[in-house]
Image: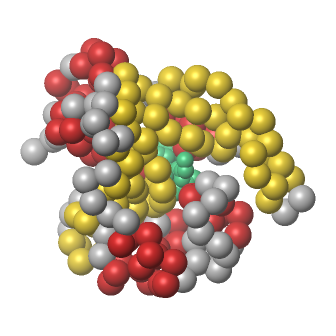
Amino acid sequence: MRAFAEADAPALVSWVDGPATLVMWSGPSGFTWPLDRAQLARYSAKAGPGLRIWTFTDEENPAEPVAHASLAVDPQGRTARLGRVLVDPAQRGRGLGAALVRAVQRVAFDEVGVHRLGLGVFAHNGTAIALYERLGFVREGISREVVEVDGTWWSSIEMSMLDREWQDLGPDATTPSA
Ligand SMILES: CC(C)(COP(=O)(O)OP(=O)(O)OC[C@H]1O[C@@H](n2cnc3c(N)ncnc32)[C@H](O)[C@@H]1OP(=O)(O)O)[C@@H](O)C(=O)NCCC(=O)NCCS
């Protein structure tokens, strides 16, 4: 993983194939359809200690972006929020999403030292919910009908993981493989 660069914008734009995908990826606010390089330039300009924005690349082809994520950290470094998780549609279903979330968990819990890592996921996004649960996140509750997409109101589930739950996973889960 490395810092998101403007050169990664075309790949990201190509992965977001419609307004529904844009909302699924980025939530109810932040970006407008169609996503473009100017919006991504404004987004990447906000990166810093309080907002880490990453591009994930293929190990065999380090120049090729395959996924994206961000981590918003509060000023005291006690809590953080995982966001903007997106894997290249051509690369899904082979464990990249899981590797990405594990990498962000390591930064949040082992490097920043947060107590709580939270995230929001739409209630009908079963793949993402199953992924987060498999990696230790717990469902907290639902915010009903937060955004209307193509005439349907989408609800959002709040999930979180705490530092003690991360520690309980043990080194096999939390240490990167060589
Ligand atoms: C959600 C998302 C990030 C998952 O990424 P991914 O790379 O496909 O994730 P993984 O491969 O780790 O796991 C996803 C699925 O592949 C399966 N899988 C993982 N490794 C696999 C492998 N080696 N072989 C076959 N299947 C595998 C998982 O079991 C899981 O199955 P499911 O669809 O039945 O739940 C991706 O679908 C995405 O970008 N979606 C659009 C944006 C989005 O929804 N972001 C989340 C916002 S909160």
Image quadrant where residue 54 sits: bottom left
* Residue plotted at (10% across, 45% down): 178
Residue 66 falls in image quadrant: bottom left
Q: Residue at x 58, y 23 (%)?
A: 140
Q: As drawn, is 171 to the left or to the right of 119?
A: left
Direction from residue 80 to residue 59 in the image, left or right: left
Furthest toward the front, the residue is 75
Task: State whether residue 131 appears in this view.
Answer: no
Residue at horizontal 54 percent and vertical 83 percent from the top: 36
Where residue 99 appears, as percent x and y from the top left, is 32, 47
The reply to whether residue 5 is in sight is yes
- Residue 175 left/right relative to 130: left
In this picture, is 60 found above or below 144? below
Q: Is residue 81 above or below residue 42?
A: above
Q: Quadrant of the N terminus?
A: bottom left
> Number of labelled discs?
0
